[in-house]
Image (spheres, grey):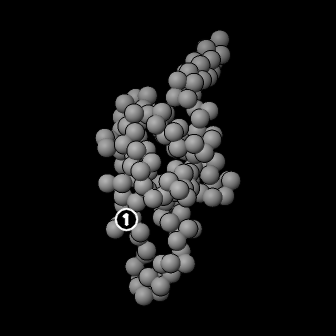
Amino acid sequence: MFFIALVGGIVGLGGFTFYYGEGLSYFKDDPKACTNCHIMQSVFDGWNHGTHKAVATCNSCHAPHDLAGKLLIKGINGFNHSVAFTSGRFNEPIRISKLNRRVALNNCLYCHGDLVVHLQQTRPEEPLDCLRCHSGVGHGR
């Protein structure tokens, strides 16, 4: 009986969080889904007025381009965001994690690799870090 109540509580709480957090919206590629959380409104506004709006959505930069990688990252981020925003334990302003930073850097190279390949060749001892100088790209400052 305890086990059934425990599983029911977990499923119920998870279902409520998914519903309340508009979880289904994250399965789409609509940047407005990111504004489900008030903390992302300024980031969305920056993207909405930036140059990347014409060519990229949030997933273009923040999710891998292969299906398995995209689902894995979205699952990890969905869980982490649910815990953070339900518990109220998150930094404001929000900060990118090491994993998500790596995904974003890979996506910089996915779209712009042919433009920056010479940078990698001139300093092969230093890993290319687009975000060191271009941290506001896509979001504004």
Q: Is residue 126 left or right of residue 31?
A: left
Please say if 34 is above or below 7: below
**Which residue position holds label 1?**
134
Residue 101 appears in the picture as rendered: no
The residue positioned 52% from the left and 24% from the top of the image is: 20
Q: Residues within 10 Å of mark 1 (few under 14, many from 20)?
A: few
Q: Front-most of 2 and 87?
A: 87
Residue 59 appears in the picture as rendered: yes
Q: Quadrant of the C terminus?
A: bottom left
Q: Quadrant of the N terminus?
A: top right
Q: Position of residue 26 (x, y in %)?
A: 58, 39
The residue positioned 36% from the left and 34% from the top of the image is: 89
In the image, farthest residue toward the bottom: 122
Q: Position of residue 51 (x, y in %)?
A: 45, 59
Q: Is residue 54 left or right of residue 96?
A: right
Please say if 52 is above or below 132: above
**Disc 1 secondary structure class:** loop
Q: Position of residue 58 (x, y in %)?
A: 52, 50
Q: Front-most of 96 and 3?
A: 96
Q: Front-most of 11 and 1?
A: 11
Q: Amino acid at mark 1?
A: His
Q: Residue 60, located in which quarter of the rendered image?
A: bottom right
The residue positioned 42% from the left and 88% from the top of the image is: 122
Please say if 13 is above or below 40: above
